[in-house]
Image (cartoon, rainbow, N blue to C red):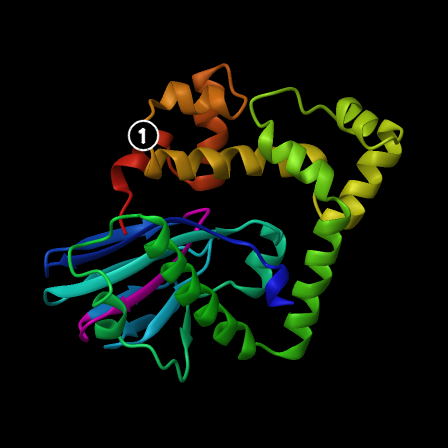
């Protein structure tokens, strides 16, 4: 089942964060994987404080709200990524908290010694990063209850059945994505398409498309230098006010505030 999951790396880095580093109320559309070289960092969740231990491998799923801080300078390795064929509904329901990967054999030193001069983003390096990410994500899934694994497998199967239409949505976020158009592409009536989409995906087409547009915009706000107006237009919003209102409704902050507060 893991082989059917597609993990897309957005960024990765090996950096030092000092004791003044703080990050409050993070809420993002992408995942994080963290490894630190020493104790001293913590995630602050709504109902608990989670210490990030030396050499521990931690995953922070998309759509998990958290704050973090550290009490000493820390060498910090991070990978930012998303999962292309697992619905956000399943992510929110199953992966609704950070995870510590138990019994991982990797250590901060063995990972970062492969990048003595910093991260260069070359093909060989990216292959190594992917191998680390997939191996650790496999260990994360291995610790999940069977019912969760079955739910993930069902979600992937459903996504695969709708592969064409979901790929069309993802690659045409700036274009017309009305139900009549998507229904024609699916060779269905508008009513049948809307009902079938919601029944299988778990959201109406309009809500799914809105969330994908906002998620794509959020990723670009952090990982590109494009202007907010250009990003809004690239995901189908011609009116910046309309974009900002919808962005804040889903992300809890304006696009400008989200970009300003973005941290690793």
**With 241 as the anchor, is 38 left or right in this view?**
left
- Frontmost residue, 105 versus 95: 105
Where are the magenta residues, as a range? 28-40
- Frontmost residue, 247 versus 201: 201
- Spot occupied by residue 184 in the image (x, y as percentages of width and height): 83, 25
- Spot occupied by residue 19 in the image (x, y as percentages of width and height): 10, 61
> Which residue shows up at 24% across the image and 65% down it?
114
Name, please, the residue furthest toward the top.
238
- Spot occupied by residue 179 in the image (x, y as percentages of width and height): 76, 27
In this view, 185 is above or below 252: above
Name, please, the residue furthest toward the front.
124
> Which residue shows up at 80% across the image and 35% down it?
194
**With 68 as the anchor, is 2 left or right in this view?**
right
- Spot occupied by residue 4 in the image (x, y as percentages of width and height): 63, 60
**With 71 as the anchor, is 51 left or right in this view?**
right
**For the N terminus, which image quadrant?**
bottom right
Question: For mark 1, what is the residue?
Answer: 256
> Which residue shows up at 64% across the image and 71% down it?
148
Name, please, the residue furthest toward the bottom.
103
Whether residue 148 is in magenta: the answer is no
**With 145 as the anchor, is 133 left or right in this view?**
left
The answer to whether residue 159 is visible is yes
- Frontmost residue, 241 versus 194: 194
In which quadrant of the rendered view does residue 72 lie? Answer: bottom left
In this view, 126 is above or below 105: above
The answer to whether residue 204 is visible is no
């Amino acid at each position: 089942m893991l082989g059917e999951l597609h993990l897309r790396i957005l960024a990765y880095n090996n950096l030092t964060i000092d004791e003044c580093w703080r990050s409050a109320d993070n809420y993002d559309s992408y995942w994080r994987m963290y490894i630190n070289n020493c104790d001293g960092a913590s995630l602050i969740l709504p109902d608990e404080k989670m210490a990030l231990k030396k050499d521990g491998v931690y995953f922070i799923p998309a759509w998990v709200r958290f704050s973090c801080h550290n009490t000493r300078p820390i060498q910090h390795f991070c990978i930012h990524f998303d999962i292309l064929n697992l619905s956000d509904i399943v992510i929110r329901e199953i992966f609704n908290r950070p995870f510590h990967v138990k019994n991982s054999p990797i250590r901060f030193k063995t990972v970062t010694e492969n990048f003595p001069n910093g991260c260069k983003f070359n093909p060989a390096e990216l292959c190594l990063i992917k191998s680390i990410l997939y191996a650790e994500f496999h260990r994360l899934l291995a610790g999940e209850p069977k019912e969760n694994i079955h739910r993930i497998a069902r979600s992937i199967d459903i996504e695969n059945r709708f592969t064409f239409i979901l790929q069309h949505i993802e690659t045409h976020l700036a274009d017309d994505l009305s139900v009549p158009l998507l229904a024609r592409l699916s060779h269905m009536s508008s009513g049948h398409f809307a009902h079938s989409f919601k029944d299988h995906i778990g959201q109406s087409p309009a809500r799914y498309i809105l969330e994908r547009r906002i998620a794509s915009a959020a990723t670009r706000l952090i990982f590109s230098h494009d202007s907010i107006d250009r990003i809004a237009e690239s995901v189908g919003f011609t009116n910046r006010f309309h974009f900002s209102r919808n962005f804040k409704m889903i992300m809890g902050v304006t696009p400008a505030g989200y970009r300003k507060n973005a941290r690793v």
